[in-house]
């Protein structure tokens, strides 16, 4: 084993600490932080401009496939959302609840799963909260139960390759997003079973709470809610919001079902490893645009409409390429990891990734998604690898431990949107949801151990 360099260790620790600190401070864009901090750190350590170019080229090569995937995945699902692909499913789930508290809880979890298929938290909350909040209020159900169930179901689905966390993990580890995702599919299935089970239990608890308030005369019983009106209101709102877009689209039922087939085909080609994710979504966008919009002007208008989201994610990943390139190619990360080996207890080292993963949800309160995946994950992976832990195993553990807590993190912009839409506040949301979310995350880690995604070394 090579001896760590004191200068490289101090430089690497300084870059990581300053990067995490600035990202947590939330006064500077991740693009600014992850591009300038590592470059300045490398210069101070003694590297020259030619070295920086080499570091950048290496980092860009590592993340380029992920950048392309993100850009076209966001465009693809944005176009399908314009076409109203998920609206009938959500409306149908509202009708299936029949105004029963337990069924509403289960339906909420399932709606979160469907709505989050595009991997965008903002879309999920915009689609579900306005549709469900009036129903929750009519049934005297807590809006914080609504937020909790949506946060958990979105966290499970957020493991998809076009979701932010897995894309970040893929760019850090250099593993193809599809390859990193496929072993997670059985865990997602387990997660869906767990969220439905939890929704039933929470629904029963909520039903009991409401019954006590009714008995105390605090609220009136609401056993005869007209659910169809809520479903119709949802459909009307969605139609109103997309009225201008719909006027320019091909709106027949045949086109709708063609969109369904297209979405399933693109995802199937990717998951079956027939096409890499970047190419699959590129082809999907190429088909979805003329399928739904006539003429190049209308097609490019929709591309421009979704371009800001695509550009934002692509720019963050490319900025992270500088961070990753500097730490990896300068040997700073390896030196930091080797230095850590001298202070880690012998029994902890081989299981460091699991220990860190078990605190993934609390870390959501302390670090942003970018800080966790671009700063903490590389360090844990580099240290764990010294004990023979595979890169994919470390990435899976860190991902599973953290991803369920995405929407209890104050660093998540989508959470603030959800709080605004529901009229909730962060403090009450955390008190209501935090320990349930953390416990759910730990159950997912146990399920990952049972499924062989990672293992405990004794």
Image (tube, rainbow, N blue to C red):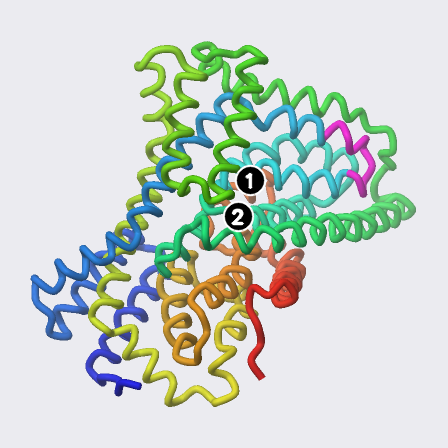
Q: Can residue 435 be seen?
A: no
Q: Is residue 379 above or below residue 218?
A: below
Counting residues from the N terminus, which is met first, the one under dot 2 or under dot 1? 1
Q: Are the residues at dot 2 and dot 1 in contact (C-beta closer than 8 Å)?
A: yes
Q: CA distance from mark 2 to mark 1?
A: 7 Å
Q: Which residue is mark 1?
A: 116
Q: From the viewer's perspective, is residue 5 above or below residue 331?
A: below
In the image, which disc is placed on residue 158?
2
Residue 279: say if magenta. no
Question: Was residue 100 drawn as part of the magenta stretch in this picture?
Answer: yes
Residue at the right extreme of this rendering: 215
Q: Whole-percent x and y of residue 97?
A: 78, 33
Q: Is residue 439 left or right of residue 299?
A: right
Instruction: Please state the extent of the stretch shown in magenta in the rendering.
Output: 94-103
Residue 205 can be seen in this image: yes
Quadrant the C terminus occupies: bottom right
Residue at (17, 69) in percent of width and height: 42
Indicate the position of residue 21 as horizontal and vertical percent values. 34, 66
Callout 1 secondary element = helix
Q: What residue is shown at x 19% (from left), y 57% (from top)? A: 56
Foreground pick, 31 / 54: 54
How many marks the image carries: the answer is 2
* Residue at 49% in and 26% down: 80
């Amino acid at each position: 084993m090579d001896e760590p360099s004191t200068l490289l260790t101090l430089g690497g620790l300084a870059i990581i600490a300053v990067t995490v600190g600035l990202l947590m401070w939330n006064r500077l864009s991740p693009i600014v932080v992850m591009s300038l901090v590592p470059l300045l750190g490398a210069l101070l350590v003694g590297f020259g401009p030619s070295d920086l170019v080499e570091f950048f080229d290496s980092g860009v090569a590592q993340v380029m496939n992920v950048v392309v995937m993100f850009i076209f995945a966001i465009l693809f699902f944005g176009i399908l959302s314009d076409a109203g692909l998920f609206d009938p499913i959500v409306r149908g789930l509202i009708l299936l609840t029949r105004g029963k508290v337990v069924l509403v809880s289960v339906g909420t979890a399932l709606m979160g799963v469907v709505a989050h298929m595009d991997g965008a938290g903002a879309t999920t909350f915009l689609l579900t909260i306005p549709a469900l909040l009036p129903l929750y209020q009519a049934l005297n159900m807590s809006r914080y139960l609504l937020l909790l169930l949506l946060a958990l179901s979105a966290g499970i689905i957020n493991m998809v390759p076009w979701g932010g966390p897995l894309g970040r993990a893929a760019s850090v580890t250099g593993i193809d997003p599809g390859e990193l995702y496929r072993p997670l599919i059985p865990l997602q299935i387990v997660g869906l079973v767990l969220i439905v089970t939890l929704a039933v239990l929470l629904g029963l608890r909520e039903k009991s709470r409401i019954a006590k308030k009714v008995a105390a005369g605090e609220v009136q019983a609401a056993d005869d809610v007209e659910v169809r009106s809520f479903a119709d209101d949802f459909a009307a709102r969605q139609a109103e919001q997309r009225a201008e877009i719909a006027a320019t689209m091909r709106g027949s039922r045949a086109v709708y079902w063609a969109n369904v087939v297209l979405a399933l085909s693109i995802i199937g080609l990717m998951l079956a490893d027939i096409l890499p994710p970047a190419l699959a979504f590129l082809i999907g966008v190429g088909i979805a645009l003329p399928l739904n919009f006539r003429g190049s002007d209308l097609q490019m208008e929709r591309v421009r409409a979704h371009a800001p989201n695509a550009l934002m994610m692509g720019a963050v990943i490319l900025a992270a390429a500088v961070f990753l390139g500097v730490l990896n190619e300068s040997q700073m990360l390896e030196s930091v990891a080797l230095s850590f080996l001298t202070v880690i207890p012998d029994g902890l080292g081989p299981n460091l990734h699991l220990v860190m993963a078990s605190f993934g949800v609390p870390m959501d309160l302390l670090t942003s998604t970018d800080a966790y995946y671009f700063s903490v994950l590389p360090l844990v992976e580099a240290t764990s690898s010294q004990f023979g832990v595979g890169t994919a195993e470390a990435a899976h553990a860190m991902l599973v431990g953290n991803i369920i807590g995405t929407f209890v993190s104050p660093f998540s912009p989508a959470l603030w949107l959800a709080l605004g839409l529901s009229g909730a506040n962060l403090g009450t949301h955390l008190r209501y949801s935090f320990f349930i979310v953390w416990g759910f995350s730990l159950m997912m880690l146990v399920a990952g151990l049972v499924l062989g995604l990672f293992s405990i070394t004794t």
